[in-house]
Image (cartoon, coloured by chain):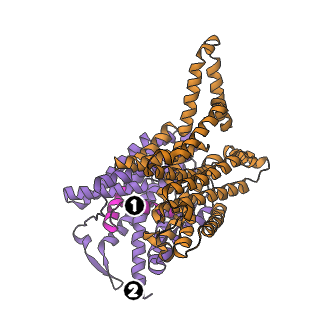
Chain colours: A orange, B purple
Amino acid sequence: MRAAALARHIPAPLQLGLLAAALVLAIALPYLTSSFYVSVATQILFFGLLAMSIDLLGGYTGLMPLGHAGVLGISAYTMGYLVSRLRWGWVEAAGVALALTVLVSLLFGFLAVRTRGIFFVMITMAEGMLVWGLAYRWASVTGAENGIRGIARPAFATLYWQYYYFALVVFLLCALALWLLVRSPFGLTLRGIRESESRMRTLGYNVTLHKLLAFTISGFFAGVAGLLYAWYNQYISPSSVHISASTEGLLMVVLGGAGTLLGPVLGAAVIVAVKNLLSMYVARWPTVLGLIFIVVVLFAKDGLVGLGRRGWAAWQQRQQRPVSAAAPGAYPMAVDEERAATGS
Amino acid sequence: MTADTFALHFLNGVTFGALLFLLASGFTLIFGLMRITNLCHGGLYLVGGYIGFSLLVFTGNFWLALVGAGLAIAALGLVVERTLLRQVRGQTDPEVLLTLGLAFVLGDLALAIWGGDPLTIRTPGVLRESVSLFGLTYPVFRLFVVLVGVGIAAVLWYLMHHTRLGAVIRAGVDDREMVDAMGIDIQRLFNRVFAFGAFLAGLAGLLGGAFLALYPGADWEILLLAIVVVIIGGPGSLVGAVVGSLTVGLIDAFAKALVPDLLYFTLFAPMVLILAWRPYGLLGRAS
C-alpha cells in the first residue's frame, strides 16, 4: 500500500530515472573522488544492507529487532575465524559463515517470534548480547577484546576500489532479492501481519511460520552484511556486535523511513556520513546520533522517505492550486483520504 | 572450591545483587506501571554516579553526594518524562527508540564532561575499612550497599503495600485504564514513578561508583544486568526484583570464578529462555 502511494506521488518514470542516476553515480564514484570517499561509500553499502535486513523485520513485519549487530557478528566472526585462523579460502569460509548465521537466526527466531511488542525487543536484545558475551569472553576463539585481525579479503578485491565494486555487486544483488521479496505474496503477507496479526490468523495464514521465515531471511541478509563488514575492516571485535551497534542499525531504519527499502539505505548513508565526516570536526557525534533519534521519533515518524513524500505531495498541491481553486476543497480532501488510507 | 572461596563468591554475589536491586527496582516499577522499557536507565545511573563524584569532590561530604546524586537524577527524570516520554505515551516502538536516543546522549555527554578514565568514589571513614566475616576479610562498604538495598526494599514494600499511593501503583500495574477511569491522575502518577525510579538509579550510580568505578560503557553493562533481573523477576514485581537481583548477582559472581569464558552467556541465555516461555517472569503473572 505504501509502495502504491509512492507510485501515486512520484511517477514511475521519474523513480526509474532517479534510480538509474544513482546507479551511474555509484559505478562512476571511484573515478570521481578520493579513496576516502569511496571507503565511506563502501561502508554505506554494507550498513545499508544491514539496515534493510532490520527493516524486513521492523518495518515490513512489525517486529523491531534490537540485536541485529549480533546476527551480523555471527557471520563476521565465523568467516574471520575460518579465514584468519584456519586459512580457509573465502568461498568456503563465507558459505559456512552464512549457513551458521541462518541456522542461529532460525533458532533465535524460533525463540523470539513467540513474543511481540516490547518483549520481542527485549528478547532480540538478549540474543544479540549473547553473541556479544561470547565475542567478549570466549577468548580462545574470538580473541576477546583484541578481536580477530588479519581477515584477508578475496584476492580479486584487495584494493579499495576493487572492494568497493565487489561490495556494490553484492549489495545490488541483495537489494534486488529483497525488492522481489517484499513485492511477492510472501512480502504482502508480512505487511498484513504488521497491520493486523489476528486478522491474518483468521484468514488462515500461519502467522508464526511467516514471522519465523522473515526472521531467518533477515538474518541471512544481516549475515551477508557481516561478511562485507569483516572484509572491509579486515578485523572484527566485540564492540561491532554490541547493543549500541544494533541501535545504530535501528536508527538507520527509523531515520530513513521504516517499511521502505530505500529508507534504510538513505538512513545508513546519513549515519555513516555523520560518523565519518562530522567526527572530523565534532567529537560529540554520539550525541548527534542520539539527538537525531529523538527528533525523528518526535517529529518525523516516517523518516526521510516520509518527509520526501510529503514534500512531493505539497509541491504537487502547489502545482495544482489553480485547479483546486476551481473546485474548492476537493484536492486537499483527497490527500487527507489518501493519508488515512496509507496510515501516514 | 574451598569453603573460603565459596563464601567469598557468595558475598560478592549478594553485595552485587544489592546494587543491582537499586537499579532494577526503579526499572521494574517504571516497566510494570508504564510499560516503558527505560533503556536510558543505565545512562541515569552513570550520570548519577558522575554527579555524585563531582559533589563529593566539591563538598567533601559522602552523604550529601549520595542524596544529591539521587535528587539530581530524579529532577532529570521528571524533565525527561514530562517533555519527551509523554509525547509518545503508549507507543512501544517510539518509547524504545526515544530512550535509546537519550541513552546515547547521556553516555556521550558524560564522556564529554567527566572524561574517559575510570573514576572511583572515595568512601568515608568506617566504610573504607574491612571486617572479618566467615573467616574472610571483607570490605565494609559492600556490606553497607546490602544494608541500603535492604532498607530501600523495606521502604518500597511498605510504600507499595501499606499506603494509598502503593495501592494505586499496584492497581496501575494491573490495569492502567481502570485506574485512569477511577479518576486518578495517571499522568501525574507516571511522572512521579518515573522520577522515583530515576532517583534510585542516581543513588545506585554513586554507590556503584564506589563499588565498580565509573567509566564509559558502564551504563550499558549495568542496564543489561538490570534488564536480566527484571525479566527473571517479572516486570512490576518487587519480590521478583529482589529474587532476580540475588540470582543475577550470584550467577555473575560464580560464573566469573568458574566459567569466565561463558560469563555473559550464563546471564543472557536464561533471559532469552524466560522471555520465550514466561515473558512475565518466573514469579510474574500476565496482566
Where does the image place residue B75, in percent across and percent down from the top left? 35, 47
Q: Residue furthest left?
A: B59
Q: Main secondary structure of the magenta part?
A: helix
* Region of the chain picked out in magenta, as a range: B200-228
Q: Residue at x 38, y 51 (%)?
A: B106
In this orientation, which residue lies closer to the viewer: A120 or B241? A120
Pointer 2 residue: B4
Q: Residue at x 43, y 83 (%)?
A: B6
Looking at the rendered structure, whether the residues under marks 2 and 1 are on a common chain is answered as: yes
Q: Residue at x 44, y 79 (%)?
A: B257
Q: Residue at x 62, y 16 (%)?
A: A329
Where does the image place residue B152, in percent across and percent down from the top left? 39, 61
Chain identifier of the residue bearing label 2 in the image: B
Q: Residue furthest right?
A: A204
Where does the image place residue B172, in percent across and percent down from the top left? 53, 48
Residue A190 on the magenta span: no
